[in-house]
Image (cartoon, coloured by chain):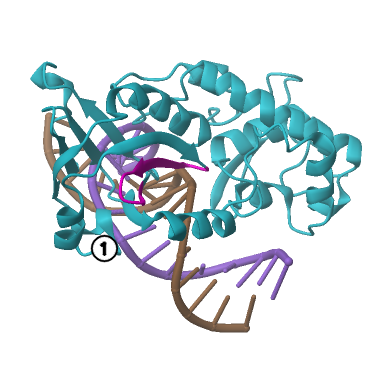
Chain colours: A cyan, B purple, C brown
Amino acid sequence: MPELPEVETVCRALAPFVTDQTFAAARVHWARTVEPHDPAGFVATIPGKRVLSVSRRAKLIVFELSDDLVLTTHLRMTGNLRFIGVDSEPEIAPQQHLRLEFDFESGDALHFYDARKFGRVRLYSSAEWAGYQSTAFGPEPLDPALDGRTFAAMLQSRKRQVKPLLLDQTFIAGIGNIYADESLFKARIHPLQPASTISTRKARELHQAIVETLEAAIANHGTTLRNYRSALGEAGENQRELLVYGAAKDAPCPRCGTKLRKIVVGQRGTTFCPRCQPMR
DNA sequence: ACACTGCCCTGCGAGC
DNA sequence: TGCTCGCAGGGCAGTG
């Protein structure tokens, strides 16, 4: 599923193609994709709006539009935002699950596909967006301002189990199930370890693991396990780097050979090594 | 502040 | 081969 590296990859692919383009029309094929907007109102707002920039915040793709508007896309589990050039071959577009489409005045198009219909596309005023994003999301893990010392202090001030905390977007933005498991494994921290009991040294190791894991995944254009594709339809390559996430049942730890354990944490499948990641 | 449940959804793989 | 069924899970609302 798309997490920070996948969303970043989509943004980077999309930006050169859609920046400075002006929307001509939008069509909604699944009303809940634009929830809580009324589809007719959403569609009526789009024509004439120009894309000023494309960026990422947490797991959201953020289109800054003219007239002080912001359009955001959350891919959730199976969303796929696809750029369809006016000259591209028809088969570049997936044949199924088209939920929302935008036309540009140039004849290019932007399609939103989503098999499971969890993805959401929303409009905000610039002011609304600024307020929302500052309360809904914690710091960006790759922001240089978030150093190891700051991260350690953040962790140690919370009593929750560390994995649910990493998945909490108000605590830190953009980490999902894959990169949480990978980072905890690299830092050798048990997913259920109460955050406040993690030493400063271990917290710094976790910060380092998160940064390295996310940066490597971005360099590999994201992890494609099943559905994820970039805005140009390309699969990522980071799946071959995964150490524990999605490991087969009874698979050995890649570090020590102990049988990996699979538990459920906060409704999510969690794979870890009981020997490398002991509860302290 | 935190834990827990249920909901939204459909494709896929396991099991029979 | 063809069927049923359980699982995958990010975010959110609701409850305790």
- Residue drawn 88% across the image and 44% down it: A280
Relative to A182, does residue A199 appear above or below in the rendering? below
- Residue drawn 52% across the image and 60% down it: A131
- Residue drawn 55% across the image and 28% down it: A247
Residue A86 lies in quadrant: top left
Q: Going by the image, does A46 lie left or right of A166?
A: left
Residue A162, percent across and down? 73, 48
Q: Going by the image, does B1 lie left or right of A263?
A: right
Q: Nearer the viewer, residue A280 or A163?
A: A163
Q: Going by the image, does A191 lie left or right of A175?
A: right
Whether residue A275 is visible, yes or no, is no
- Dominant SS in magenta: strand
Q: As shown in the figure, which amino acid type bears the numbered disc 1?
A: His
Dot 1 falls on a residue whose secondary structure is loop
**Residue placed under numbered mark 1 in the picture:** A37
Crowding near the residue tagged with mark 1, few <14, some 14–19, many ≥20 C-alpha atoms within 10 Å: some
Relative to A99, does residue A261 appear above or below in the rendering? above
Residue A235, percent across and down? 36, 20
Give the magenta part as a residue range: A58-71
Q: Nearer the viewer, residue A210 or A40?
A: A40
